[in-house]
């Protein structure tokens, strides 16, 4: 399958191609949890502890009601769906889990995991962004191609990916729900890491809105521009003052000039150079 075909196919197409006609006829087997490895394309990295404990309690009393789905690999099994059930089973003290083994090909497994999980509603925005990044790398897609595949706008995908540039501790706060997508997008536009962390703390402690952050950032950018302009003007003034001083002290055939924040001195002969050197010596004494 070429790249264009992959982009055209959606999640529904993938599911239809691998549809099981009669799931009740599939064999359910108990598999050792230690023999099951996580799906590398699973974007979810954070699992609610309370929800897992509640599921574990249910499993203790009633068992795992819905088998997980795995794919056989060289050193055991790879999980296709059911990571929460596996984690909760371990918490419940179980060593095995009921599973259905299906012979998915690697291409399908990668596409299904990426597309199905990208569109989950319970992913944090960081996990969603990481899923986009994995999809782009694994499938060699552009932002626009991935956006077309998952039914999002290119700008949405690009903004989500931009969040991954934020410091790790800020990403942790996003995963905890303390910083929203809007906040994160505004923070990702800043360059100074220390400033990003400081504003992040302000968001959490002072409950700043996205508009508050945008106004704060614009205000700081304006101050920085004014400061740079003043510094540039002061520098230029100092250069001009130095030029005038040298022109008065040294009689050169070619006048001293200021060009591109530089003082340009042209010497016609060695005698003029010696005059200039003497001025420097006299000025330092």
Image: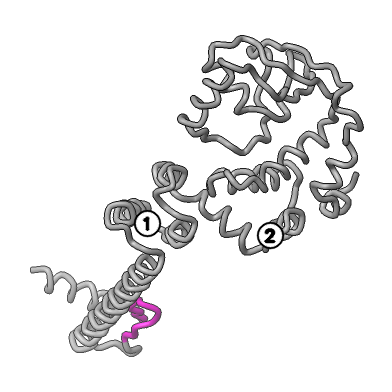
Mark 2 and mark 1 lie on one chain; the one further toward the N terminus is 2
Quarter of the image where the C terminus is located? bottom left
Q: Please give the name of the residue rendered at 88% of the width and 35% of the height, measured from the top-left corner.
A: 18
Q: Nearer the viewer, residue 29 or 55?
A: 55
Q: Position of residue 280 (x, y in %)?
A: 18, 72
Q: Is residue 234 left or right of residue 84?
A: left
Q: Which residue is mark 2?
A: 152
Residue stretch in magenta: 256-268
Q: Is residue 271 visible?
A: no
Q: Is residue 142 above or below residue 140?
A: below
Label 1 neighbourhood size at 10 Å, few (<14), some (14-19), many (20+)?
A: few
What's the coloring here? Answer: one colour
Q: Which residue is mark 1?
A: 192
Q: Please give the name of the residue rendered at 61% of the width and 47% of the height, measured from the top-left corner.
A: 121
Q: Is residue 195 above or below residue 28?
A: below
Q: Is residue 139 left or right of residue 1?
A: left
């Amino acid at each position: 399958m070429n790249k264009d075909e992959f982009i055209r196919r959606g999640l529904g197409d993938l599911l239809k191609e691998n549809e099981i006609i009669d799931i009740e006829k599939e064999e359910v087997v108990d598999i050792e949890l230690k023999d099951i490895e996580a799906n590398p394309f699973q974007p979810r990295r954070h699992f609610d502890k309370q929800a897992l404990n509640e599921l574990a309690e249910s499993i203790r009393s009633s068992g795992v009601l819905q088998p997980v789905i795995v794919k056989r690999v060289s050193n055991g099994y790879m999980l296709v769906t059911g990571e929460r059930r596996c984690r909760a089973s371990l918490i419940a003290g179980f060593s095995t889990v009921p599973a259905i083994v299906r012979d998915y090909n690697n291409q399908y497994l990668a596409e299904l995991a990426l597309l199905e999980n990208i569109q989950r509603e319970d992913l944090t925005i960081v996990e969603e962004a990481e899923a986009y990044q994995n999809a782009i790398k694994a499938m060699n897609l552009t932002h626009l191609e991935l956006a077309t595949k998952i039914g999002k706008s290119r700008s949405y995908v690009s903004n989500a990916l931009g969040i991954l540039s934020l410091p790790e501790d800020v990403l942790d706060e996003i995963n905890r729900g303390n910083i929203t997508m809007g906040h994160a997008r505004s923070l990702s536009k800043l360059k100074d890491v220390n400033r990003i962390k400081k504003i992040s703390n302000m968001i959490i402690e002072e409950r700043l809105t996205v508009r508050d952050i945008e106004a704060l950032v614009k205000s700081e950018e304006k101050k920085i521009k004014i400061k740079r302009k003043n510094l540039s003007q002061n520098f230029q003034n100092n250069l001009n003052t130095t030029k005038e001083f040298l022109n008065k002290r040294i009689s050169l055939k070619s006048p001293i000039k200021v060009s591109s924040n530089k003082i340009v001195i042209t010497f016609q002969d060695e005698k003029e150079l010696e005059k200039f050197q003497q001025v420097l010596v006299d000025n330092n004494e």
